[in-house]
Image (cartoon, rainbow, N blue to C red):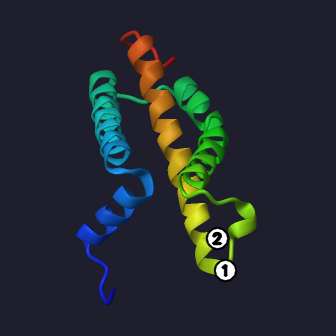
Amino acid sequence: MKELTFGTVIAVFEEIFGRGLFWTMVALAVLVTLAYFYVLIRDRAMSMRKFLWAQLSMPFGAVLAVIFVQQMTHSGLRDIGGPVDVIVLLGVAVLGAVGSAILIYTIQSLLRPSRSGQNS
């Protein structure tokens, strides 16, 4: 593998997660992202209360993302072998944290839309 192409990355993720699960996760990520943009456009402002709750969910999202990837790859923390493994693990944790914050904020905003003129 002399060069890293987009197709190669997709093939690796399909191999790790399985084709069905991988594309289901991609579809869910696209749906949540579109819902997040819808909420931001609809409300025209971010609710700081909802944003705080979303931020509080970030550590849980990070831990769950790491556990999920370790389960899918049949590995554990004892299998970390070098700096690249640590960087990948931290990247997974960051993506899980950000993803959970976006998901929680979006769910809160869809279930309890902010009233016009209020920032709750």
Rendered image: mark on residue 118? none
Left or right relative to 18: residue 95: right
Residue placed most toward the observer, 78 or 41: 78
Residue 98 locus on image (x, y percent):
51, 46
Residue positioned most to the bottom: 2
**Amino acid bearing label 1:** Gly
The crowd level at tag 1 (other Cα within 10 Å; few <14, some 14-19, many 20+) is few
Residue 120 locus on image (x, y percent):
51, 17
Residue placed most toward the observer, 76 or 113: 76
| Whether residue 63 can be seen here | yes
- Judge whether 72 appears above or below 46 on screen: below
Check disc 2 and report its element: helix, strand or loop.
helix
Residue at position x 48%, y 25% in the image = 47
Instruction: Tell me, yes or no, whether the two marked residues, 1 and 2, touch with CB atoms within 8 Å.
Output: yes
Residue at position x 24%, y 68% in the image = 7
Check disc 1 and report its element: helix, strand or loop.
loop
Residue 33 locus on image (x, y percent):
33, 38
Residue 57 locus on image (x, y percent):
62, 34
Task: Give the total number of marks visible in the rendering.
Answer: 2
Residue at position x 33%, y 67% in the image = 9
When asked about the image quadrant of residue 42, the answer is top left
**Amino acid bearing label 2:** Val
According to the picture, the residue beneath numbered tag 1 turns out to be 82
| Whether residue 114 can be seen here | no
According to the picture, the residue beneath numbered tag 2 turns out to be 86
Residue placed most toward the observer, 19 or 29: 19
The crowd level at tag 2 (other Cα within 10 Å; few <14, some 14-19, many 20+) is few
CA–CA distance between discs 1 and 2? 7 Å
Residue at position x 42%, y 27% in the image = 106
Residue positioned most to the right: 78
